Image (cartoon, rainbow, N blue to C red):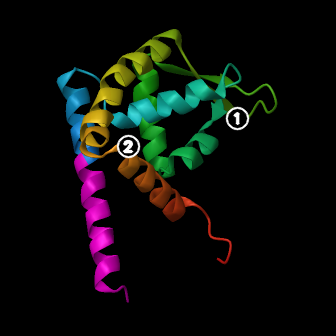
Amino acid sequence: MPDETTEAAWTRLMRAQGAAISHVEAALKDAGLPPLAWYDVLLEVERAGKAGIRAIDLQQKLLLPQYGISRLLSKIEAAGYISRQSSTEDGRSQEIVITAAGRQLRRRMWAVYGPAIEQAVGSKLTASERETLAGLLEKLTSPRADA
């Protein structure tokens, strides 16, 4: 069982994440932009380059369930921001690639998302506190050597 301090850290971490995500989602909505999950997809697909990325690889990067990624990709594709192409390596699979409109949308979303991150996190902490928090969160998200 966790001690009181560990439980408090967990609770505050979850509340901080929820507050930050809610702030970013509201900023995107107020700007008439799609939800944050669209940005995450567009960013990873854009990073994959011209070759694209398989849905299974995208799913693993985003840590979304298969049914969630499928629906999300269908919506983004229907809006014209990504396309699916047959894989050059394996004709049975498809590669997801970003369209020019998708790159443009991702940039428009970042213009809102970036300042929202600054407002939700950056402006509330000193440079030293941000560095400490980033280090602590890295510790929580890195695989442990003794695990």
Q: Amino acid at mark 2?
A: Ala
* Badge 2 vs badge 1, beta-carbon distance below 8 Å: no
Above or below, 95 against 128 in this view is above
Q: Is residue 114 left or right of residue 63?
A: left
Closer to the camera, 113 or 45?
Answer: 113
The image quadrant of residue 144 is bottom right
Q: Position of residue 25 (x, y in %)?
A: 25, 36
Q: Secondary structure at mark 1?
A: loop
Q: Position of residue 18 (x, y in %)?
A: 26, 52
Residue occupying image coordinates x 53% and y 14%? 99
Closer to the camera, 147 or 71?
Answer: 147
The CA span between labels 2 and 1 is 45 Å
Residue occupying image coordinates x 30% and y 43%? 121
Q: Residues within 10 Å of mark 2 (few under 14, many from 20)?
A: few
Above or below, 29 against 100 in this view is below
Query: Would residue 12 be counted in the magenta stretch?
Result: yes
**Residue at the spot of label 1:** 93
**Residue at the spot of label 2:** 127
Q: Position of residue 116 (x, y in %)?
A: 28, 32
Residue occupying image coordinates x 57% and y 24%? 46
Chief secondary structure of the magenta portion: helix
Q: Amino acid at mark 1?
A: Ser
Mark sitting earlier along the chain (2/1): 1
The quadrant of the image that shows the C terminus is: bottom right
The magenta segment: 1-19
The image quadrant of residue 56 is top right
Query: Would residue 53 be counted in the magenta stretch?
Result: no
Closer to the camera, 69 or 112?
Answer: 112
Q: Secondary structure at mark 2?
A: helix
